[in-house]
Amino acid sequence: MNTPVLVQGGAHGLGLALVTALLTDESLHVTATTRDPAAADALSALQQKHGEQRLDILALDITDEDSIARARTHMDERHGRLDLLINCAGLLHDEANGMWPEKRLADIDPAYLARSFAVNATGPALMIKHFADLMTHGERAVLASISARIGSISDNGYGGWYAYRAAKAAQNQLTRTAAIELARKSRALICVGLHPGTVDTGLSAPFHKRVPEGQLQTPTQAAKHLLGVIAQLSPADSGDLFDWAGQRITP
């Protein structure tokens, strides 16, 4: 039986690159989630290439707890366990709805704050809530949420970006708190946050001009780095935040 792994938010950008990289390991069965499987053309192409026995495409909206619960039931019925879960969904801006990272206090919008928290903090926490029992089976398992260095309070030297900074800081705290509780159920479960660096995706696209030369990673590069970090994690690392090079980030 192939080892079951799940990538939440696997239809685009870094999530899609992680799915693609994981499929190179013949020992894994990959489940990729997306809000609309019918529109996930890239995932469908991967499924045609590798077959449904290697890649499952599952509907999941990280802002809808019922959707998360249904996905969890599907995983339980199909596999009965889970060995790797990577939460990838993130929200930094939404130009269509007038949402943009704040430069000053006057820009703070309660609706944008609420939406940022829903995607960047509450959603990953709900994923942990619903899927953790499939991962406390006593064998090594990794529950990783894509976070950001910008969520580190001690590393904040520039200000601005209130909603994104606060939501990622909240995500890091939720991950840490969950790690403490879950360690009581399985010492082999590792629960961490991962900072991928600046990746060439839609989330970071408007800010590429600010990225120093040589520091913008392709999704393929970032996925390779993050999976390398995951492979090296031990239970002693649970609750912490790591960057793409495996360096621990101070909260």
Image (spheres, grey):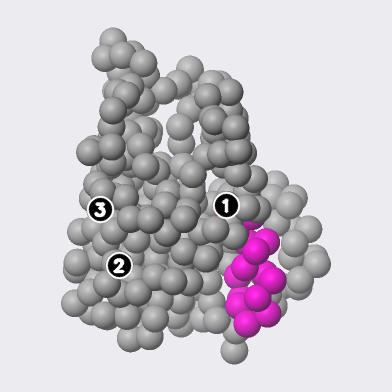
Q: Three-letter amino acid code at disc 1?
A: Ala
- Quarter of the rendering containing residue 248: bottom left
The residue where tag 2 is placed is 237
Question: For the residues marked 1 and 3, what is the alpha-carbon distance in whole angstroms?
Answer: 24 Å
Residue 114 can be seen, yes or no: no
Q: Nearer the viewer, mark 2 or mark 3?
A: 2
Looking at the rendered structure, which numbered label has been put on residue 222? 1
Helix, strand or loop at mark 2: helix
Q: Out of 128 and 68, give the one closest to the viewer.
A: 128
Residue 238 sits in quarter: bottom left
Q: Amino acid at mark 2?
A: Asp
Picture quarter containing residue 58? bottom right
Decide: marks 2, 3 in contact (CB < 8 A)? no
Q: Which dot marks residue 241?
A: none
Specify few, some or many for label 3: CA neighbours under 10 Å numbering under 14, 14-19, or 20 or more. some
Q: Position of residue 37 (x, y in %)?
A: 65, 53
- Using the image, determine if residue 170 lies above or below residue 163: below
Judge whether 185 appears above or below 165 on screen: below
Residue in front for this viewpoint, 136 or 201: 201
Disc 3 designates what residue?
Answer: 174
Task: Tell me which label, 2 or 3, sits earlier in the chain.
Answer: 3
**In front: 134, or 232?**
232
Residue sitting farthest toward the front: 213
Q: CA distance from mark 2 to mark 1?
A: 20 Å
Q: Where residue 158 sits in the image (x, y, percent)?
A: 32, 24
Q: SS for tag 3?
A: helix
Give the quarter of the figure containing the N terminus.
bottom right
